[in-house]
Image (cartoon, rainbow, N blue to C red):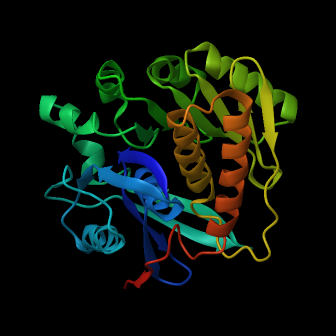
Amino acid sequence: MYDVSALGFGDNVVDKYEHIKTMYPGGNCVNFAVYAKMFGAKRSAYMGYFGNDAEAEHVMYALDDIGIETVKCKQLEGENGCARATLVDGDRVFLGSNEGGIRGKTPYVLDRFDLEYIRQFDFVHSGNYCFMEKELPKIHEAGVPISFDFSDDSEDSYYAEVAPTVDYAFCSFDGTDEEAREHLKKIVSYGPKLAVASRGADGCILYDGQEYYVQKAVPIREVVDTMGAGDSLITSFMVAYTDHLKKGITGETAIRESLAAAAEFASKVCGMNGAFGYGKKYE
């Protein structure tokens, strides 16, 4: 058990696997909340908007069954976030989405009561598909650290706008090691304390403004589904690293031990169907 409380603030979707007509609950911030619980965080919560269709009901059922705190969620009239996907040799391939459904059309505006709730957590996680960018400065000003997933498709202008409000920046990166290092250096120049580039089977690289840390991926006996692999790496690193900081362990020791724990956890997630199971057939 880690003495860490973590909050995912943003997206929830169902991932509809068209080749098997099965939908799985997911979304960067829902995955984050679930993985934090699986990894051993003492408190894990999700905060965001749901639609009011069968897809929304399935995500809410899964979160309730797993024991994720959802007291600050709201349910709106409309379509839940939904992404279409398939698998090619175990690798998930996205085929399209409804851009968050009703969540994408309804801004989540944080008020003082929301911020009072958010201050109960050690850190908040969000991402570039969450439509929460305008609210990050409020969380930042409330003194709560923010981790943020820029994914693999954020433009330079987006980094310049969002990264200054973020403490821990994550992204996926396909280029060379040298290109990845330059990319991380640029991200940290905007203000984050740490930046991490996940490289799939090549592991990940972290930059703390002074040193680069390389973490190899843990070999996987059988890749069932890579859905959620990056999210699980982010979550487990953040929980382990925050736990280290709370114990007064900082610097290289905290980074290396947290990266190793994250690589181990991410390898296990690749052995699950969907992001974290809970598949349900749909018509």
Against 261, residue 17 (above or below) is below
The percent coordinates of residue 84 (x first, y second) are: 48, 66
- Judging depth in this view, the residue of 21 and 111 nearest the camera is 111
Q: Within the image, what quadrant is residue 134 found in?
A: top left
Task: Name the spot of residue 70 as percent of width and height, x first.
Answer: 24, 57
Question: 216 or 103, which lies in front?
Answer: 216
Can residue 63 be seen at all in this image of the molecule? yes
Q: Nearer the viewer, residue 66 or 170?
A: 66
User: What x and y, as percent, mark residue 38?
Assistant: 49, 64
Q: How many marks?
A: 0
User: In the shown orientation, is residue 204 left or right of residue 86?
Assistant: right
Residue 197, position as x, y percentages in the image? 69, 38
Quarter location, residue 173: top right
> Residue at left 34%, top 40%?
121
Which quadrant of the rendered structure holds the C terminus? Answer: bottom left
Q: Tell me if residue 199 comes above or below residue 176 in the rendering.
A: below
- Classify residue 257 as left or right of residue 12: right
Q: Is residue 109 at least partly visible in the picture? A: no
Q: Residue at x 58, y 39 (%)?
A: 244
Q: Residue at x 54, y 31 (%)?
A: 168
> On screen, 259 above or below 98?
above
Q: Kindly indicate the quadrant of the structure image that contains residue 91.
A: bottom right
Which residue is at 36% across, 56% downward? Answer: 12
